[in-house]
Image: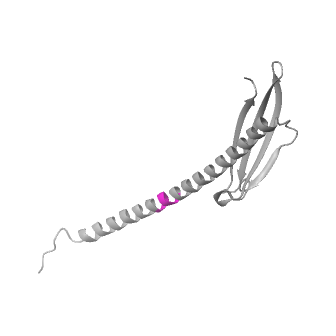
Amino acid sequence: MRRRSRSTGAALLTSIFLIVVLAGLGVAVMNLSNVEHDTTSKSFLSAKVYYGAKAGLDWGIQQAVAASWDCSTSGSFSLSQGAFSGVSVVVSCTRGTHGAGNLVWYITSKATTGSPGSLGYAERRMEATVSNIP
């Protein structure tokens, strides 16, 4: 008659444990990969609308300084060059006076991409105050 060892089945339990641990690590790596992809995508959208809003603000400042903009019209344009494709920019302005004859422009630039409610939507708003005060 053969004697049975007390460690019979230990290899089976160890292999099942390792399979469960490795499967858990695989799921964790997949989730981390998805989060990294989403973060990169959101960062790219954020940069697109930041530079779109900055371009609109620079345009508004140039209009105020070079042409003494009366703010009766707002600027609205779409960017279509390279990575900026799909960015819409709206520039609005309010003009006032400060003291005797000094003009002040309050310029707001808002850039958007995508449609509201979608995962590809991003918006950035920038403001500047420009004056001819010496």
Q: Identify the image quadrant of the C terminus.
A: top right
Of residues 17 and 27, the one nearer the viewer is 27
Q: Position of residue 112 (x, y in %)?
A: 72, 50
Is 32 a magenta residue? yes
State the image coordinates of residue 44 (x, y, percent, origin top left): 59, 54
Residue 61 horizontal side relative to residue 30, left or right: right
Hey, which quadrant is residue 82 in on the image?
A: bottom right
Q: Is residue 96 above or below residue 120?
A: above
Residue appearing at x 44%, y 59% in the figure: 28
Image label count: 0
Question: Residue 119: x percent and y percent?
Answer: 66, 56
Residue 83 placement, left or right of 98: left
Q: Quadrant of the N terminus?
A: bottom left
Residue drawn where x is 78% and y is 52% of the image: 77
Identity of the residue drawn at 65% across and 46% down? 50
Q: Is residue 37 left or right of residue 107?
A: left
Question: Is 28 or 104 nearer to us in this picture?
Answer: 104
Task: Return the residue found at the far bottom.
Answer: 1
Q: Which residues are magenta?
A: 30-34
Residue 53, placed above or below residue 26: above
Work out which residue is located at the far right of the displayed protein and give it: 72
Q: At 53% from the left edge and 59% from the top edge, which residue is drawn?
A: 37
- Assign the magenta stretch its main secondary structure: helix
Residue 6: x and y, percent?
Answer: 18, 68
Coloring scheme used: one colour
Residue 103, quarter of the rendered image: top right
Note whether 50 is above or below 131 in the view shown: below
